[in-house]
Amino acid sequence: MTWILLQFIYPVLIILIPYSIYKRQGAIVEKFNLRIAWSSSYRKLFMLVTLLLLLIFHFICLNGQCSLAGLVPSSLFVLGLFSYKYSHWILNQLHKPKLMFSAFVATLVLLFVPGMYSSAVTLGIILVASLFYPTKEKIRQNNQYK
């Protein structure tokens, strides 16, 4: 029973905590945004933390009641994110408005398809991560001053 509760509470926390931080726009958020745009090491750390959150969710799903039909595609996607080039490309592509909207609609559709809950949450966590990831222009602009 605990695993099932964690399975539903964890995605809500992953969405609400960054949302509350993003709404504040304090000095901490500004420093974080500058550092992640300035250094590729911070971007790699950001992706590793995102991967850790995804792996924890997959562990919760595996112990809960997620179906393998939804867990296998999302697990393969998460395994692909271990490549920094691929994850950097994915997060940069999600800055395009049409693609972000399509991914958001796909997340909502997958939530209501039986057995695809884990894939929907994986896509949702990637969408939240892309909101904090700097755009190509911001990275290029900060790299000019190095």
Image: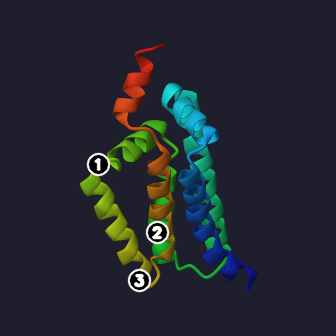
Q: Position of residue 129 (x, y in %)?
A: 50, 51
Q: Quadrant of residue 35?
A: top right
Q: Which mark is nearer the camera, 1 or 3?
A: 1
Badge 2 crowding class, 10 Å Cα cut-off, few under 14, some 14 to 19, many 20 or more, is: many
61 or 23, nearer to the observer: 23
Q: Quadrant of residue 114?
A: bottom left
> Could you tell me which secondary element the residue under label 1 belongs to?
loop
Vertical placement of residue 59 versus 138, above or below: below
Residue at image point 43% right, 20% down: 143
Indicate the quadrant where residue 16 lies.
bottom right
Q: Are marks 2 and 3 in contact (CB under 8 Å)?
A: no
Q: Which residue is the site of mark 2?
A: 119
Q: Amino acid at mark 1?
A: Lys
22 vs 104, left or right, is: right
x 65%, y 79%: residue: 64
Q: Earlier in the sequence, mark 2 or mark 1?
A: 1
Front-lying residue, 45 or 82: 45
Sequence-earlier tag: 1 or 3: 1
Mark on residue 24? none
Q: Which residue is mark 3?
A: 112
